[in-house]
Amino acid sequence: MIRTENLCKRYGKFEAVHDLNLDVRPGTVFGFIGENGAGKTTTLSILATLMLPTSGRAFVGTAEVTSDPAMVRRLIGYMPDVFGVYDDLTVREYLGFYGTAYGVANTLLEPRTQELLHMVSLEDRSDAYVNALSRGMQQRLGLARCLMHDPPVLILDEPASGLDPRSRIEMREIIKGLRERGKTVLISSHILPELADMCDEIGIIKSGQLVACASVEVVTARANGQRQMCLEVLGEGQLLAHFVRRHEWVTDILSSDDCKVELLFAGGDQEQVEFVRELLQAGYHLKSFHEVGGSLEDLFLHLTKDEERVDQQTAASKQML
Ligand SMILES: Nc1ncnc2c1ncn2[C@@H]1O[C@H](COP(=O)(O)OP(=O)(O)OP(=O)(O)O)[C@@H](O)[C@H]1O
């Protein structure tokens, strides 16, 4: 649903995005994670047709951002990392204004506004002036704004940044609801745990390049110190997956066929040796047992530095709720 092909963006001589290939499947929530300055906003701005790529292509559905920006804009709701609000409008007027700008039919404006205010829990604030809303409320209003024309795709640039723990949780719940409505969501953040709870897939961008892309299960497991391993045996490895699945250090099977299984392994080196011994004892002819996707490891460790802090905040906030 969202795709980039060798996307590049240079600011003068500086290359902010380099040969980026993204593929976000329809109906999924894709977490785009990277440190400050990694190139997230640049990528999302290109997808939102606000900026031209230096080279490469980007698509939303079948519409290409440079050749068919009008169609792309119809398909997406874009929430930038920083956005202003019109001070002298009430919440209801604000949504009505954007609905009209997006071409929503007059008859639909009121019911759509009502539905979205309910979705972002701002029903009782509909007559408040937008500048009187808290930061969290303004962010939720910003999300409602980009849903006014009911786009199938949402591009959200750090929607939870600057929010307190309670507001982060509220935002997370709303985004989970978007997935249930069948929306495709591309969401950026620089904190892995913030995304892990609501995403299907995570892509990591570093210095403008997508350095890793994996399902959220793999990412979370890695963050918890588990390793993604590939096990291959020679000849007929009947019941190999069955044998592996029952093993205490195997937490998940990612793929399997007769002779090859990709799995998540919770043990360390010693457990790995023991695991291999048990396989040989069971009569399997081991060809290889090795870690895959190792380059993710350091990144995840690095990216999860903030995990403890966010978890503590979340726990404290849950107590408050
Ligand atoms: N208009 C610009 N002119 C020159 N350099 C820019 C411009 N916009 C961004 N950059 C640089 O491009 C790189 C990527 O910036 P970008 O805003 O895309 O990163 P980001 O991952 O969104 O970071 P953050 O999390 O801080 O928003 C950074 O080094 C930034 O300084």
Image: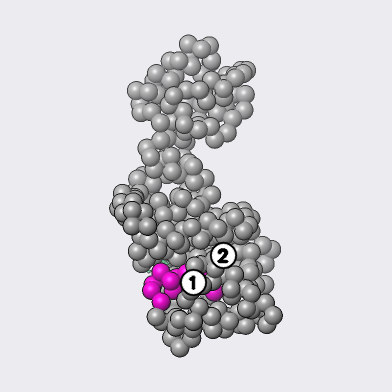
Residue at 40 percent across and 51 percent down: it is 193
Q: Residues within 10 Å of mark 1 (few under 14, many from 20)?
A: many
* Residue nearest the observer in this picture, 101 or 18: 101
Residue underneath mark 1: 122
Give the residue type at disc 2.
Leu
In the image, which residues are magenta? Answer: 133-145
137 part of magenta stretch = yes
What's the mark number on residue 154? Answer: 2
Q: Nearer the viewer, mark 1 or mark 2?
A: 1
Q: Earlier in the sequence, mark 1 or mark 2?
A: 1
> What coloring was used for the rendering?
one colour
Seen as rendered, the residue at the extreme front is 124
Residue 295 occupies quadrant = top left
Of residues 243 and 23, which is closer to you in this image? 243
Per the image, is 109 magenta? no
| Residue 234 placement (x, y as % from top left) | 57, 19
The residue shown at (48%, 11%) is 281
Amino acid type, callout 1: Leu
Q: Quadrant of residue 273?
A: top left
Residue 50 lies left or right of residue 136; in this view the side is right
Q: CA distance from mark 1 to mark 2?
A: 20 Å
